[in-house]
Amino acid sequence: MKKRFLFFGMMILCAFIKVNAQLKTIKNVNDTASADSEIPNATVYFGYGAELTHQSKVKVTPETKTIIINHLSTAIDINSLQISVPEDVALLSHKYRVYYPQVPIVVKPAAIEKL
């Protein structure tokens, strides 16, 4: 009897954890806006690098907490990063991070390795 009770308790706990994880995923999708950036202006300095101006327009709702801007340079000087928003929008923080997608591991067949 105790084993059955323990088994059903573990099943209910696992189901609760799975539903909770799915709800967190749905919640994160709803509070995130994403947009691609465009480069309207680029200035090249001889021997010193370049200045790239990226622009992006994002439609947000009152529930939006995170904005992801794609297609930015991978070599941004964090100290020169400037973000402007309209007066009725409060920018609380910003973070720059390069996303590197995971490359799937390919297993080579033994016949190919012999070549």
Image (tube, rainbow, N blue to C red):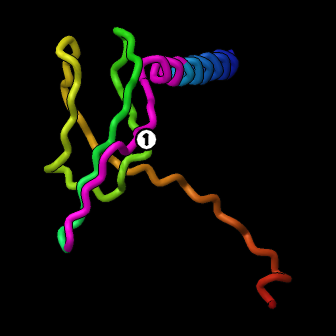
Quarter placement of the N terminus? top right
Residue position marked by numbered label 1 in the rendering: 70
Residue 46 location, quadrant? bottom left
Comparing 57 with 109, the one in front is: 57
Name the residue located 82 percent from the left edge and 81 percent from the top edge. 110
Q: Is residue 104 above or below residue 10?
A: below
Kindly identify the amino acid type of the residue bearing the numbered disc 1. Answer: Asn
Segment colored magenta: 23-46
Comparing 2 with 32, the one in front is: 32
Quarter placement of the C terminus? bottom right
Q: Is residue 82 above or below residue 84?
A: below
Q: Is residue 6 above or below residue 53?
A: above
| Label 1, residues with CA under 10 Å away: few <14, some 14-19, many ≥20 | some
The percent position of residue 101, horizontal first and vertical second, equals: 52, 52
Secondary structure at numbered mark 1: strand
The percent position of residue 16, horizontal first and vertical second, equals: 56, 17
33 in magenta: yes
